[in-house]
Amino acid sequence: MYNPKYIVNGQMWQYRGPKGPAIHTFFTADGTAIGMFQGSRGVRPDLDFKVKILLPNPESVPYLLPHDEWGVDLLIKAQHYKGEIIGLLNFYLHFYENCHPFNSVEERAAYAPTTIRHIEELYSNVKVDGTMSIGGIALILELFCLCEKQNPDAHQFCLTLLWTKECIEGTRDLRNLLNIVIRHREY
């Protein structure tokens, strides 16, 4: 089902950058593998991590998920489930404000997702062909919240959460959202 080069004994592997297994590999309800790999940025590069996605296809290779992809995924879902996606974004904006970055490599190694089950229960009805599972989106948003919190001055991810919500509500122009996720410009 997966490319055997990238899933070995239930763990995602990377071959670009430091070769080796993911710190954590998670599998979503739709079969997508999400790997958490060592990063090298920020004020604590030892605690930084990257999130890579591997689709359940023997030809697929892991890729870094840019902010524009999860944002577009939510915009598509919101065309059918506006209230649910606004609720999901409110949930992760609150989670972002209250979560704490990892304090040690050991704490990061012992990490277990805390929001997925709740989100899957609340929004199990959100299913749109061609988009990620709601559990996959939940895991990605949780990981990105934790990752950005590693850097005290970082705010692009949180701003993207807020602007995606505002775009769905009709209070922010889509061009503002696209500029932050593609060009990293805030206006």
Image (cartoon, rainbow, N blue to C red):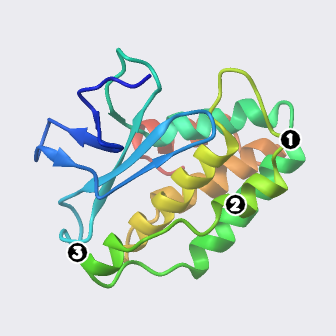
Tag 3: Cα neighbours inside 10 Å, few (<14), some, or many (≥20)?
few
Res. 167 image quadrant:
top right
Screen quadrant of the N terminus? top left
Could you tell me residue 125's position as x and y percent?
86, 41
The amino acid at mark 1 is Asn
Q: Residue at x 47, y 60 (%)?
A: 143
- Of mark 1 and mark 3, the one earlier in the sequence is 3
The extreme front residue here reads 9
List the residue tagged with mark 3: 43
Amino acid type at circle 2 is Arg
The answer to which of 58 and 105 lies nearer the viewer is 58
Question: Which residue appears farthest toward the left when viewing the image?
Answer: 18
Residue hosting label 2:
117
Q: Residue at x 51, y 36 (%)?
A: 68
Considering only order in the chain, which callout, 2 or 1, is on the residue closer to the N terminus? 2
The circle on residue 125 is: 1
Residue 161 percent across, percent down from the top left: 61, 55
| 97 with respect to 66 (left or right) | right
Crowd band around label 1 with a 10 angstrom C-alpha radius: few (<14), some (14–19), many (20+): few
Q: What's the residue at 72%, 21% (across, down)?
A: 129
Q: Classify residue 185 as left or right of residue 96.
A: left
The label nearer to you, 2 versus 3, is 2
Q: Amino acid at mark 3?
A: Val
Point out the frontmost of discs 1 and 3. 1
Position of residue 44 in the picture relative to residue 152 (left or right): left
Sequence-wise, which precedes: disc 2 or disc 3?
3
